[in-house]
């Protein structure tokens, strides 16, 4: 993740965004530890081919020292 953040800063990118399944607690914890915060929750209707529950979180990290 540090490599991605550094590359973004080198290219004058001020924010990183990502989506993660809301039930993927391990990934959410990792991203929060990397200074990402939830900016929006998107509901996803049940579908038998999508083995997730709770929708999707849009998360963002602001790269302050760009």
Image (tube, grey):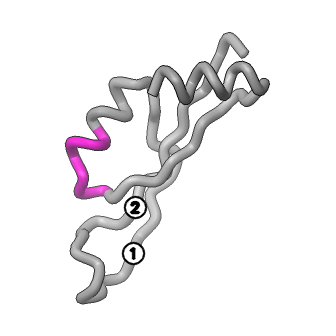
Judging from the image, what secondary structure is the residue with disc 1 in? loop
Residue at image position (36%, 31%) is: 32
Q: Which circle marks residue 56 in the picture? A: 2
Q: Nearer the viewer, residue 56 or 3?
A: 3
Mark 1, residue position: 44
Q: Is residue 26 magenta?
A: yes
Residue 37 in the image: above or below residue 6: below
**How far apart in space, not on screen, are marks 1 and 2 (Cα)?**
7 Å
Residue at image position (66%, 28%) is: 8
Residue 4 in the image: above or below residue 20: above
66 vs 33, left or right, is right
Q: Position of residue 46 (x, y in %)?
A: 29, 83
Q: Position of residue 49 (x, y in %)?
A: 28, 85
Judging from the image, what secondary structure is the residue with disc 2 in? strand
Q: Which residues are magenta?
A: 22-28
Residue at image position (73%, 20%) is: 10
**Marks 1 and 2 in Cβ contact (< 8 Å):** yes
Q: Position of residue 38 (x, y in %)?
A: 45, 42
Residue 55 in the image: above or below residue 6: below
Q: Position of residue 17 (x, y in %)?
A: 57, 43
Quarter occupied by the C terminus? top right
Quarter occupied by the N terminus? top left
């Amino acid at each position: 993740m540090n490599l991605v953040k550094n590359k973004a800063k080198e290219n004058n990118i001020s924010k990183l965004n990502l989506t993660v399944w809301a039930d993927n607690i391990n990934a959410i914890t990792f991203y929060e530890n990397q200074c990402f915060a939830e900016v929006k929750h998107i509901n996803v209707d049940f579908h038998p081919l999508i083995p997730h529950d709770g929708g999707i979180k849009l998360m963002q990290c602001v790269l302050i020292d760009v």
